[in-house]
Image (cartoon, rainbow, N blue to C red):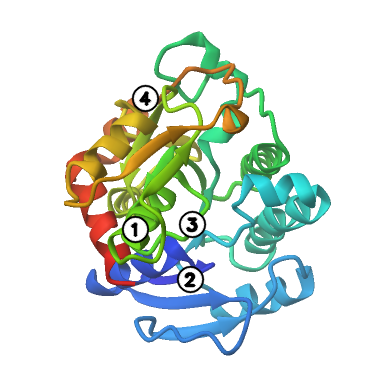
C-alpha cells in the first residue's frame, strides 16, 4: 500500500513509519517543516494540514491507498493556553484531510487519531469504557479530538468513504518527550543517577488509576486498522488494565541503585473527579484480532533505560 502518515516526525509517527516500511508498504511521511530528517520513509512531503489548499494538492497528487493522520497539538496544557490554535490544528486539520479524500481520492482509507480524553467525565462510571459510551470532554484538547472524530465520521457516512477514528488511551515508551507521567519520572531519575539533580522527586497525587499501553502496541493497532477491512466507526485502543502513578514510580525506583527521596507536594494535587479511567478494546480485538503484547513493567524499565542514554 501507498500510505501517507501525517505527523510522521513525532513520537508515535517515527515508530509507525519504521513498522510500515518493515511490512513492505510504501510510506510517505507528512511533515510541517522541510528540514525534518525522515530517513526511514520512502518519501517525504511537506504541508500544513490547516491549509485546505495545501491538503487538497497533496491528496490529489499522491492518491494514497491509506492515510494515518497523526499530526496534532497533543498537549493538554498547551491546549488550555491556546484553545483556538488547538481546535484549528486538531479539528480543522482533520476535517481538511477527510474532506479532501472525499473530493479527490475516494478510495483512500483514513485512520484518524483521537484520544481517550474524549470520554472525560464519563469515566466516573467506574468501569471499562466502550465506544458507545457518551463523551463529556473536560479540556480544550479533548474537545478538539472529540469534534474532529465527529466531523470525520459524519463526512465519511455522508460521502461513503472509509474512515476509522481510533481512540488510544495513555501510551508511552522510549523517545517520548517530557510532559507525560512515565517520561517525566524516567527523565528525573536519569538526571539524579548522573548527578545532574538532587536525589528528590516531588510528586502530587499518585493514586489515580489509568490505562497504559506501550506505544509499539498502539501503532500495531493503527496498522491493523488500516490493513484490514474495518467498518467506518470508532475503536478504542487500550490495555483494559489500571495502573497508578505510584506503581510506575515504584517500578522505576526498584530498578535504580540510587536512594531517591519521594516528597509529596500538596500544591501539585489536582482533585481527580475520575479516580479510575480505563477502556475496553473488545471491539478492536474482534475487528482485527489485536491485543497488547508487551509487559507493562518491561516497557517502564525500557523507557527509563532510554532516558539514561540521553
Can residue 292 be seen in this snapshot?
no
Q: Distance of mark 3 from mark 2, alpha carbons? A: 19 Å
Q: Quadrant of residue 69?
A: bottom right
- Mark 1 or mark 4: which comes first in sequence? 1
Residue at 61%, 20% (x, y): give it: 271
Q: Distance of mark 4 from mark 3, alpha carbons? A: 27 Å
Q: Distance of mark 4 from mark 2, alpha carbons? A: 27 Å
Q: Distance of mark 2 from mark 1, alpha carbons? A: 32 Å
Depth check: give the residue in front, 302 or 227.
302
Residue 8: mark: 2
Depth check: give the residue in front, 229 or 12.
12
Number of the front mark, 3 or 2: 3
Number of the front mark, 4 or 3: 3
Residue receiving disc 3: 178
Residue at 48%, 17% (x, y): give it: 275
Q: Is residue 148 left or right of residue 225?
A: right
Amino acid at each position: 500500500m501507498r500510505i501517507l502518515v501525517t505527523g510522521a516526525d513525532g513520537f508515535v509517527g517515527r515508530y509507525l513509519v519504521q513498522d510500515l516500511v518493515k511490512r513492505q508498504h510504501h510510506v510517505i511521511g507528512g511533515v510541517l517543516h522541510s528540514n525534518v530528517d525522515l530517513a526511514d520513509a520512502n518519501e517525504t512531503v511537506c504541508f500544513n494540514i490547516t491549509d485546505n489548499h495545501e491538503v487538497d494538492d497533496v491528496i490529489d497528487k499522491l492518491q494514497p491507498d491509506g492515510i494515518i493522520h497523526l499530526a496534532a497539538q497533543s498537549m493538554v496544557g498547551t491546549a488550555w493556553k491556546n484553545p483556538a490554535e488547538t481546535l484549528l490544528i486538531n479539528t480543522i486539520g482533520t476535517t481538511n484531510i477527510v474532506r479532501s479524500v472525499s473530493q479527490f481520492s475516494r478510495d483512500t482509507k483514513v485512520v484518524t487519531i483521537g484520544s481517550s480524553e474524549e470520554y472525560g467525565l464519563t469515566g466516573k462510571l467506574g468501569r471499562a469504557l466502550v465506544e458507545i459510551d457518551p463523551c463529556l470532554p473536560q479540556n480544550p484538547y479533548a474537545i478538539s479530538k472529540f469534534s474532529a472524530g465527529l466531523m470525520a465520521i459524519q463526512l465519511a457516512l455522508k460521502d461513503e468513504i472509509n474512515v476509522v477514528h481510533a481512540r488510544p488511551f495513555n501510551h508511552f515508551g522510549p523517545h517520548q518527550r517530557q510532559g507525560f507521567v512515565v517520561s517525566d519520572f524516567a527523565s528525573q531519575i536519569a538526571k539524579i543517577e548522573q548527578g545532574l539533580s538532587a536525589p528528590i522527586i516531588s510528586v502530587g497525587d499518585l493514586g489515580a488509576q489509568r490505562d497504559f499501553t506501550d506505544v509499539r502496541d498502539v501503532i500495531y493497532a493503527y496498522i491493523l486498522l488500516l490493513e484490514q477491512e474495518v467498518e467506518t466507526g470508532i475503536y478504542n485502543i487500550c490495555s483494559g488494565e489500571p495502573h497508578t502513578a505510584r506503581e510506575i514510580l515504584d517500578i522505576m525506583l526498584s530498578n535504580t541503585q540510587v536512594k531517591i527521596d519521594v516528597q509529596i507536594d500538596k500544591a501539585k494535587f489536582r482533585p481527580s473527579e475520575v479516580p479510575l479511567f480505563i477502556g475496553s478494546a473488545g471491539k478492536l480485538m474482534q475487528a482485527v484480532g489485536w491485543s497488547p503484547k508487551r509487559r507493562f513493567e518491561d516497557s517502564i524499565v525500557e523507557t527509563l533505560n532510554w532516558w539514561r542514554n540521553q
